[in-house]
Amino acid sequence: MKFSHIADCHIGGWREEKLNLLTIQAFEEAINTSINKQVDFILLCGDLFNTALPSIDFLKRTVQALKKAKDNLIPIYFIAGSHDFSASKKTMLEIIEHAGLAINVNKQETTDQIHLKFTTDLKTGAKLTGLIGKKGQLEKTDYEMLDKASLEQEPGFKIFLFHTSITELKPKELEMMESYSANLLPKGFDYYAGGHIHIVNKINLDNHKNVVYPGPTFPNSFSELEKLNQGGFYIYNDGNLEYQELKLKEHKNIN
C-alpha cells in the first residue's frame, strides 16, 4: 500500500503575489510527485485553501490538479481544516466533492454521540474516516462526543484523518498553543494523518502508532520560510514513511 499524506497547503494564503503563486505551484508539484510515485490514493488533511472561498484563478488550477490525479485513477480523500471549514457549508470543498474530484471522509451521524462512518478505498481496502478542524480548536467537543468504541472495533487497515494540535508532537516554540493529548483520538488505527500544526514530525505511542504531521506544502509565513526553507509531504510505502521535499526556489536567510 502506498499513499500520499498532504496537509496545510493554504493555497492563496500570502499577500505577496510571487509568494502566493508558490502556494498553488507547491500543491501542483505534490500532486505530480504523487502521480509519478504511483501512489494508490492521496490524503488531504485540512486547509487546502486559506479561506472557504478562494479566488477563481487558484480554484481553477486546484481543480485541474485534482482532475489530473483522477485521470490517473488516484482517488483523493479529504477533511476540512480550520481555514477552509464553513459552518454554513458554503465552501469550495463541497463543490469539489460534488464534482467527483475528491471524497470527504467526514461522514457522520449525530445522536447523543457522533458516529463516524468509514469510507473504503476500493483498490487497497483501506478504511478511512476523520474529524474536521474548526476555528479556535472548537473541534475538541466533537472528539469528546465521538463514539470511539465502534471505530476501535472495526477490523482492517484503518486511517484516521485529523486537523488539530496533538500535545505529544507539539514543539517547544508552540508550548503556549492549546493542544490535546493523543488519547483524544480513537485507538488502534494503523495511521493517523494529521494537519494544522506546520511541523514535520511523527510519533509512535502505545495505542496510537504513526501519528504524523507532514508540515505545509509551502511555508505560510516568513518565520516558516526561515525555519522550514521549503514545504513537503509524506508518502507512506508499506509501513515506511518517505518525506518528499517540494523545493520550488533556492532559499537563503540573511541575518
Image (cartoon, rainbow, N blue to C red):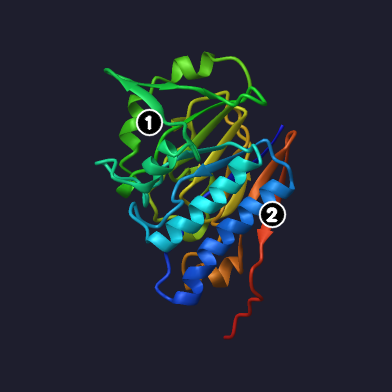
Please give left or right for residue 20 compared with residue 109 in the image.
right
Q: Say whether marks 1 and 2 touch (CB < 8 Å).
A: no
Q: Residue at x 62, y 24 (%)?
A: 122
Q: Dot 1: what SS? A: helix
The answer to which of 95 and 228 lies nearer the viewer is 95
Residue 227: numbered disc: none
Q: Residue at x 51, y 64 (%)?
A: 23
In this view, the residue in front, 145 or 21, is: 21
| Residue at x 42% of width, y 34% of height | 131
Q: Which residue lies furthest to the left in this view?
A: 88
Q: Quadrant of residue 55?
A: bottom left
Q: What element carries label 2?
A: strand
As drawn, the label of residue 143 is 1
> 167 or 54: which is nearer to us?
54
- Is 69 displayed left or right of 162 in the figure? right
Q: Residue 92 in the image: x percent, y percent?
A: 37, 48
Q: Distance between the residues labelled 1 and 2?
A: 31 Å
Visible in this render: residue 232? Answer: no
Q: Where is residue 175 shown, x and y percent of the image?
A: 44, 55
Residue found at x 69% / y 47%: 35
**Residue flagged by tag 1: what amino acid is it?**
Tyr
> For mark 2, what is the residue?
244
Residue 124 x, y percent position in the rendering: 67, 26
Q: Quadrant of the C terminus?
A: bottom right
